[in-house]
Image: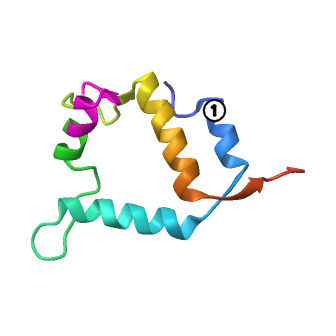
Amino acid sequence: MDINHPSPRLKRYKLMRIDQDKIDETVLAVLLLTLHDERRVWKNISWDVLDNLQTKGYIFNSKNKSKSIMLSEKGLKKAEEVFEKLFKSGDLITGV
């Protein structure tokens, strides 16, 4: 997928009112999984987490050299459910 042409599903999330503080806090917590040298963290997701997601059938081929991974249909559905549960903070934005 070309990053300049994102999925049509993304439009829904751009119109959703989200709690940005919750997203920031969640990312900060996930970064902690890559902590090394006292306060340094990697700008990617822990390999252990990716392996777990692959084992659960949410993603494919987590050990490739690409900078992206592919969600399975099950993984996409789960990601959408969790995103809305954790970060949605109201109705869709209208009049945009």
The residue at the far right in this view is 95
At a point 28% along the width and 36% down the height, the residue shown is 53
Residue 18 as seen in the image, left or right of residue 29: right
At a point 73% along the width and 48% down the height, the residue shown is 15
At a point 60% along the width and 65% down the height, the residue shown is 19
Q: Nearer the viewer, residue 84 or 62?
A: 84
21 shown above or below 87 = below
Q: Report x, y in % for residue 6.
A: 58, 32
Q: Report x, y in % for residue 33.
A: 21, 60
Question: Which residue is the site of mark 1?
Answer: 9
Whether residue 60 appears in magenta in the rendering, the answer is: yes
Q: Quadrant of residue 69?
A: top left
At a point 46% along the width and 36% down the height, the residue shown is 78
The part of the chain drawn in magenta is 52-61
Residue 28 as seen in the image, left or right of residue 82: left
The residue at the far left in this view is 37
Q: Report x, y in % for residue 14.
A: 67, 48
- Under mark 1, the amino acid is Arg
State the SS at label 1. helix
Q: Nearer the viewer, residue 96 or 56?
A: 56
Q: Nearer the viewer, residue 19 or 31?
A: 19
How is the structure coloured here?
Answer: rainbow
Q: Quadrant of residue 48?
A: top left
77 shown above or below 39 = above
Residue 8 as seen in the image, left or right of residue 34: right
